[in-house]
Every structure is written in C-alpha cells, then in structure tokens.
C-alpha cells in the first residue's frame, strides 16, 4: 500500500514537477521554503487544482490518470486549510455534521463523536463560529475533516496562522491523531519543530521539485541535504520509557543504541517517545571518559563527515544503527583523526523530549 | 380615498412586481453565479449588457421591446404566425419588459454576494464530499443570503416604480397594463392632486420601508469569515 503521485504543472513563472511514492501510513511532512510549491502539490493531490497528464494512486484507488479524474468530492480525503475556513452560516456542530453526513454508507471510519473527542471540542459544539478563538477554530476544522472519514488527510500548514501559544495548544492533538488513527497524513509545513514532532516520513521541496524524500530520522541526518548541515541540525531518536529512578528522579529511555537518562517524566513504562538531539550538543571522545558530569555517553561509529563552515565539521554517527549528528570544530576532527568507520564515544549534553 | 381604478392599478402593480421578482431570481441567480465565478476574458461585455438598463432611458428600452414584440416585430411576427397574440400591450409583455428593466438590480447584488463568498468555502465543501450542485445550495446560497434579500427587494421596488417601459410597451389598459405609476400620471393630468398625493405618498412610504428593512437586515447579516 502506498501513495503514488506524478505531476508536472507549468504556471508561468512557477513549475511543479514531482514523482513521489509515499507510504500510505503515518505522517508524511512536505517541507520547504514558502513558495516552493508545497501548497500547490497538496491542492493537486486533492483535485482542487487540475493537472492534466498527472497520475495519482492512493492505496488501491486511482484518483487520476490519463483516462479519469475523480473530482474532489468523490475522493475520500480530508483537507485542512491554513485558515480554518469554517462555514459561517453553520454552528460548530453544523460544520462537523456537514462532511459526516456525506460519507457513503459503509465507509465511515471516524464518527463525529470520535473526532470531537480527539480534538477536545465537546464544549464548543453549540457555539457559533464567530465565538471561537483562532486555536479553537482550527481544532474544529481538523475535527470536521476527520468526521468526513478520510482515507487520506491533507493538512496545509494548519498551525501557520496561529501564535506560538496556540500552536502549543494544538500540537498535542495532532500527535494523538497520529497515535490513535490509522489514517495517512500529508502535512505541509515550513516549521522544523512541527516536522520533528509529527513526521515519520519527510519530503523536501524546493522550487517546485522534490529534493529528496525518505524516513524522517534519515533525512534529518543526511549531510548532503541542508537540514543536516544547518546550525539547528538535530537527530531524531525514537525511544521507549524503560524505567524510572526514584532516588535521583530520572527516567531511563531505551533506544537501539543504549539508554538515555533524562529528568523524571510522568510517563508509563513502555510508552514510545521522540527525542531530539541537537548536533551542537554532541561532543566526541576517543575513550570512554570517566569523571564527567555527562550521563549520556554512547559508543558510536563515524559514518560520514562534512565540512559545514571554515571552522566546523558535521559528523554523522551510527549509535547501534541509529543516526546521530555531532558538530565539532575542524581542529577537533583533525586532532581526533576522524574518518569513516572510526569508533568513538558520543557525549550527549542535552536531549529534548518531543512528545 | 382610493378609487376602484386605483385599487385595480395597485393590485396589478403588486402582481407584476411579484411575478417579475420571482422570474428575476430564477434567471438572475445562475447568471450572477456565472458572472461571479467565470474567468472568461470577455465576461465584461456581458456585465455591461446586464448594467445597460441602469443608464438607458426606460423609453429606449421600451421602444425596442415594442418594436420587437409588436405585431410587425420579429418576435411579435413569429407569435402571430403561430396563431398567438402579440405580447405588446398585454400583461405578459409588461412582465418581459420589466424583467429587462430590473435585471441589474437583481443580478448585481447577487453577483457581489457570490463574489464575497469566494472560492474557499466551496473548496472546503468539495473536500467534505459535496457535489457542485449540493455545495451551491448548502454553502453558496446560505452565505449569500443577504445578497438575495437585497436583490429581491430592489427588484421588487424598482419594478413597482417603473414608468417609461410600461408606457411604451404596456400602454394604459386598466386591469391589464395600467400600473400605479401610470395611474399617478393620469391623476396629475386630470389635476386630481389629492389622488396623486395618496398614491405617490403611499409608494414613497412603501419604498422607504422596504429599503430600511434591507439595510437593517444587512447590518445584522452574518459576516463571511475566512
């Protein structure tokens, strides 16, 4: 099962040319600067923009090829626009019912009640749309799209129009969607933080073209892509809660390369979490250093090196098969005599828990 | 007080305005929708045609309709050949003339209202599974409701007040084509100022109340939000 999309569209100054095969599960983030064609790609996928000669297959269904073009209203999709775009003539319940009522019999995947519960909007149902805050409006819009029982959910920067506080309000809901529903999501964004928290798969776009795509952990640590060379470059690690140490109020998080110790988290053992480790917070040593305050030290292997500035080198490491980035000075790299395959110890100064 | 003839003229006027408003809403809605949404490059020509009755002396419109609908006109000739009555100087002819005359008063508010709705709500409805006709009736029409109210009231009031077109194409047949404005003219001609005052003042108050109603309703109407 996968999503296959092949489109080329010429709009004068801007041209879109994509040929993608995406997993039909999890969250695929489409990431790139403003104006790179992310939104156009999403509109073409939805059928809101016609792109003659294109091809689109979602799971077993062909939505577009040379013979047919399934109009948007016959595609089992949900679309969340950047602005909530609620129907002003209907109240919140009416907005939610609009799509839910039009789901063909036997194709219901998400009930209105489920969508309401997932977005936590029970208390808003009787309100009119004018009485909602920006964050509430967007939550209603997401619930409305879910209640239409989509087989594919398209989201066009749903948080871009909101301030930081509102974004933090909505992100947990988006994370719970990923965990609770088995609906593939294509999530357009230009915010690295959202991508790191939500995405399983990443498509990098620039000037209407796909630069690269692949699993998020790979993509963030590829040194041939801008994300892996950026000042803010960071690796993403999926771990699970292994144990709690009540004496020192620490939580131990297990991943294939070892265990992280972090400040006590109120999470059940076994819960999957995402960790973000910034390249600048990882230093390297040749021997396992004793007498250090750093708790998180892992044996690693140098996979790749790239000079990112006159003074700095980005090192891609493998920690038990899990990619990790370390940004060190060029001088350090020379002193350590780093080369591919060299075993080192990675000292992680700080780690951020994303979910 | 109102004479029997005045009452007949009043009844006829209201009947004419009602029929014309209904026809205009039925014809004007799809036309206004198309004008609001089409990207055809020569659309402006059609917009100019729709707006013509705003600037043309009603007598000019009435004159051409008379020529077309009269027994020797192309349409009237056709009707005569088919064994039908020519439409000039009939109530049906009056309806046709009024439809043309009041067209912009219905189409323009509707077009503006549809344009204000914009494409986004329609796209949202499409992604929620609504077919084009479905989303027209469940999204575009409700959101454009203030426009429909304005269009209906303006179309009705403007038809009530017409004179030139009626005079040219309808004449002055009591019970058939003699409407209020003509009746007022007759009273003035006959120096019956009392009757003229009664009808004129009535029309003035009626028109004012209608417009007050429209503007009050527009103020309360739901704003279209993004």
Image: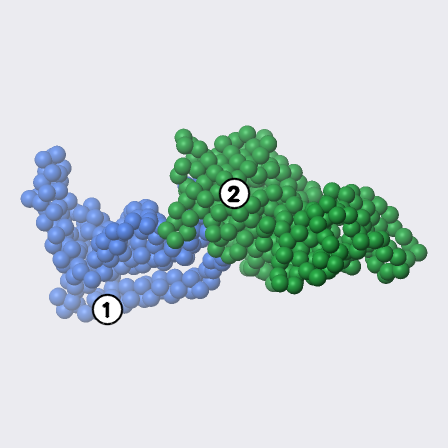
x 64%, y 53%: residue: A306
Which residue is nearer to you in this view: B18 or B152?
Answer: B152
Counting from the top left corner in percent of width and height, residue B108 is at 31, 57
Marks 2, 1: nearer the viewer: 2
Quadrant in which residue B47 is drawn: bottom left
Q: Depth check: B135 or A267 in front?
A: A267
Chain to which mark 2 belongs = B
Q: Chain of mark 1?
A: B
Instruction: Using the image, determine if residue B201 lies above or below residue B172.
Output: below
Chain shown blue: that is B
Left or right of residue B66: residue B18: right
Name of the residue lying farthest toward the left: B72
| Number of disc labels | 2
Colour that chain A carries in the picture: green
**Colour mode of the rendering:** by chain
- Secondary structure of the residue carrying tag 1 is helix
Name the residue that disc number 1 marks. B197
Q: Is residue A93 above or below residue A67?
A: below
Question: On the rendered image, what quadrant is the N terminus of chain A found in?
Answer: top right
Q: Nearer the viewer, residue B110 or A74?
A: A74
10 Å crowding of disc 2: few (<14), some (14-19), many (20+): many
Return the residue at label 2: B128
Residue at the image point whose x is 80% and y is 53% from the top: A286
Residue A106 in percent (x, y) is at: 59, 30
Circles 2 and 1: CB atoms closer than 8 Å: no
Q: Residue at x 43, y 61 (%)?
A: B217
Is B159 positioned to the left or the right of B153 in the image? left
Mark 1 packing: few (<14 Cα in 10 Å), some, or many (20+)?
some
The residue at the point 67 percent across, 55 percent down is: A314
Q: Visible in this render: residue A120?
A: no
Mark 2 → mark 1, Cα distance in angstroms: 57 Å
SS state under label 2: loop
């Amino acid at each position: 099962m996968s999503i296959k999309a092949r489109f080329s569209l010429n709009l004068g100054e801007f041209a879109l040319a994509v040929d993608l095969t995406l997993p039909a599960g999890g969250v695929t983030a489409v990431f790139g600067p403003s104006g790179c064609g992310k939104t156009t790609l999403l509109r073409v996928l939805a059928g809101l923009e016609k792109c003659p000669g294109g091809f689109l297959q979602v799971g077993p269904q062909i939505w577009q090829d040379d013979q047919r073009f399934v109009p948007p209203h016959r595609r089992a999709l949900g679309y969340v626009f950047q602005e909530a775009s609620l129907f002003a003539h209907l109240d919140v319940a009416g907005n939610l019912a609009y799509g839910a009522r039009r789901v063909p019999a036997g194709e219901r995947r998400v009930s209105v009640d489920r969508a309401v519960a997932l977005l936590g909007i029970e208390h808003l149902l009787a309100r009119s749309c004018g009485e909602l805050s920006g964050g509430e409006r967007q939550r209603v819009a997401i619930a409305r799209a879910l209640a239409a029982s989509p087989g594919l959910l398209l989201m066009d920067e749903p948080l871009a129009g909101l301030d930081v506080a509102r974004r933090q309000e909505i992100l947990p809901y988006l994370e719970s969607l990923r965990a609770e529903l088995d609906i593939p999501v294509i999530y357009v964004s230009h915010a690295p933080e959202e991508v790191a928290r939500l995405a399983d798969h990443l498509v990098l776009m620039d000037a209407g073209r796909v630069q690269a795509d692949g699993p998020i952990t790979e993509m963030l640590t590829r040194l041939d892509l801008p994300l892996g060379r950026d000042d803010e470059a960071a690796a993403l690690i999926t771990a699970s809660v292994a144990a709690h140490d009540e004496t020192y109020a620490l939580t131990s998080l297990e991943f294939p390369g070892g265990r992280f110790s972090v400040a006590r988290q109120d999470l059940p053992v076994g819960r999957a979490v995402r960790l973000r480790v910034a390249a600048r917070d990882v230093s390297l040593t040749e021997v396992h250093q004793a007498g250090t305050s750093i708790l998180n030290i892992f044996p690693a292997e140098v996979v790749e090196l790239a000079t990112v500035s006159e003074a700095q080198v980005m090192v891609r490491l493998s920690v038990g098969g899990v990619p990790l980035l370390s940004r060190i000075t060029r001088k350090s790299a020379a002193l350590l005599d780093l080369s591919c395959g060299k075993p080192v110890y990675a000292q992680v100064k700080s780690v951020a828990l994303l979910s | 007080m109102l004479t029997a003839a005045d009452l007949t003229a009043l009844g006829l006027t209201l009947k004419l305005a009602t029929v014309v408003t209904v026809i205009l809403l039925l014809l004007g809605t799809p036309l206004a929708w198309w004008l609001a949404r089409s990207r055809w490059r020569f659309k402006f020509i059609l917009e100019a045609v729709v707006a013509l009755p705003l600037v043309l002396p009603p007598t000019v419109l009435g004159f051409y309709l008379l020529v077309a609908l009269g027994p020797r006109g192309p349409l009237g000739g056709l009707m005569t050949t088919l064994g039908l009555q020519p439409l000039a100087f009939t109530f049906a002819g009056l309806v046709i003339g009024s439809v043309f005359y009041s067209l912009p008063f219905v189409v323009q508010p509707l077009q503006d209202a549809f344009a204000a709705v914009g494409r986004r709500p329609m796209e949202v409805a499409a992604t929620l599974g609504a077919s084009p006709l479905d989303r027209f009736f469940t999204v575009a029409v409700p959101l454009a409701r203030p426009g429909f109210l304005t269009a209906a009231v303006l179309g009705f009031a403007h038809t009530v007040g017409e004179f030139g077109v009626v005079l040219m194409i309808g004449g002055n047949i009591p019970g058939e084509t003699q409407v209020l404005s003509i009746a007022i003219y007759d009273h003035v001609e006959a120096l019956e100022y009392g009757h003229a005052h009664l009808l004129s003042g009535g029309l003035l108050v009626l028109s004012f109340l209608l417009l007050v109603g429209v503007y009050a309703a527009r103020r309360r109407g739901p704003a279209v939000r993004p």
